[in-house]
Amino acid sequence: MLNLLVSIKQVPDTTNIRINPETGTLIREGVPAIINPYDISALALACNLKKTYGGKITVITMGPPQARLALKEALEYFADRIILLTDRKFAGADTLATSYTLAEAIIFLEKTDRPFDLYFFGKQAIDGDTAQVGPGVAARLNVQVITYTIKVDELDLEKRKIVVQRKTEKGIEILSAKLPVLLTCEREAGHPMFSPLSAILQAQKAEPEVFGVDGRIPYELNRLGLKGSPTRVHRVYTPEIKKQGKMVNLDEVGVEAAVEEIIKLLKAKGVL
Amino acid sequence: MTAETSKEVWVYIEQEEKAIHPVSFELLGVAKRLAQDLEGITAGVLLGHEVSDLTSEIFAYGADKVYIVSHPALVYYRHITYAKALSEVSKRYKPEILLLPATPLGRDLAGGVATLLETGLTADVTELSIDKATKNLLMTRPAYGGNIIATIICPDHRPQMASVRPRIFPMPERKEERTGEIITVEVEISEEEVGVERIGFIPKEKTVKIELAEVIVAGGKGIGGKEGFAKLSELAKLLNGEVGASRLAVEAGWISYEHQVGQTGKTVRPKVYLAVGTSGAIQHRAGMQNSDCIISINIDPKADIFKISDLGIVGDWKKIIPALIERIKKEKGLG
């Protein structure tokens, strides 16, 4: 029986983000919150392994109280146990403090239940795009990490060995690793299956187990949230836009003249 | 100021099979500028097995020092061995700044190393400078899909770490005659403890190298389908260039992800970027706005892409692109 952990993040759907042009701040109203798409793939991969080998999936997230909705959605993807880490003291965490908060909770779960065989993360979250938290948690748990996972080829529970395909710049690398391993997942790692109606109904009723700075997980306060974050936002602004050049209207000048303008520029830049 | 007390700006030199990724040299260029502002020196960190031949290249691109860790367990990249070696060297020699390429390999490495060093790491930085008053590194990056730009600092932890994507900074001048100090560092790694092994590799059949192209002909949603991209490809070939695409075009399945330019795709800075039927969403602009010259064609006179274009043509690309292809063929004596 596999013991699987999946870490997810609730993110704003960045394709729908708008900026207040006067203040340069995000307009959060009306921006839907979704589960980070790469985390869905991670969850789907865990779910495929659970189907083949049997086992249990625990899904964990750190976030504001409303992140419980992301966890409830995870139940529709066949999660068995859902854990929400939420506390005002977690707020403002950068990737270092986030990896600490998650890793301490994972260690707590392992102590109170049993160790995980595999840990799944998305390759990155679409709001920050840092790709740092997965490897960071692996470093804290002192387990192997395999990033950019696209496929699990083999899993041998007796030998405690896994064979994984990962994407690199030059091709696909096939790695054999001893369990436990932390995998960060590409989109192709897994595609979620449709949930039966019963799972959806159950998800509506279920609530996550909630942990904070309440003494159960032995958090050091100075390593949490903004206080535990070495990086600081110094300044935020909307991007400057380069000066506009010459404009030509095709219908006014005709195709030939417009083509001539392009040719002139291509020659000036030495590419023709 | 002696070498022991001067502030060092380090660049992780990414090598695979004894070939250095060119982004490492771009980072040496920016490291040199930062080192000057700190009155410090620039150093490269090279990990691998029997890679000492590569040091002359690292000096040629501006390093004053090269730290080398050579070990059989480092013969190919694995997170655990490389993260251990790089964090050990940093702990021992305490750089002020550590820059890494934001390549798949560099990103894999950076998150682990920052955690082992318990320091801050800023990903995908697009600007780097030194704050005159505090001497802190100012790391600027786009956030939320490029909708805002944030400058990040790491005031109380060292090294200050940042990853930078290829083609963000220009390639510095190569000077053959430059040399410097080589420091060989021993790190203990035992193969048994590693627990991960490469057992196979499938090279990419065709690699699209749009990052290095001098001309890019890019299409967006307005291209409408695969046939349209075939036309752009014909034009790109005539100009010895490559085809780029916006996220929407890639997500529509008209062209593969390798061609995607933007915040979640590649960053390019060609001599000429010809944007066809792309609205110029900020997520796309983040990957191409540093191009030398931007020419754009769009039917919508209000398209944002025009605001950053050197030449903007309002009209239907289907009318102008075929005419442009014919005109270039004539120019080259092909038609």
Image (spheres, rainbow, N blue to C red):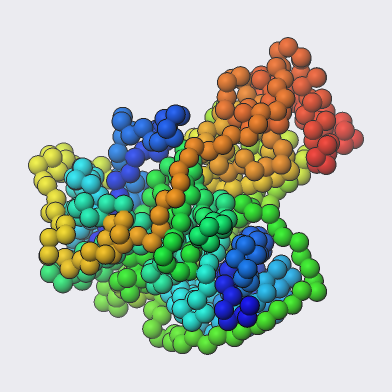
Of residues A164 and B178, the one drawn nearer to the viewer in this rendering: B178
Q: Quadrant of the C terminus of chain B?
A: top right
Q: Is residue A225 above or below residue A29?
A: below
Which residue in the rendered view is the most extreme toward the top? A252
Q: Residue at x 83, y 37 (%)?
A: A268
Q: Is residue B5 above or below residue A76?
A: below
Q: Is residue A88 above or below residue A258?
A: below
Q: Is residue B17 visible?
A: no
Counting every numbered tag in the picture gives 0
| Image spot of residue B146 (x, y percent) | 49, 41
Q: Quadrant of the N terminus of chain B?
A: bottom right
Of residues A88 and A149, the one drawn nearer to the viewer in this rendering: A88
Q: Residue at x 52, y 87 (%)?
A: B186
Residue A201 found in image quarter = top left
Residue A28 found in image quarter = top left
| Image spot of residue B68 (x, y percent) | 59, 81
Which residue in the rendered view is the most extreme toward the left? A205
| Image spot of residue A112 (x, y percent) | 12, 69
Q: Residue at x 34, y 40 (%)?
A: A12
* Left or right: A260, with B286 as reference point: right
Q: Residue at x 70, y 22 (%)?
A: A247
Residue A251 found in image quarter = top right
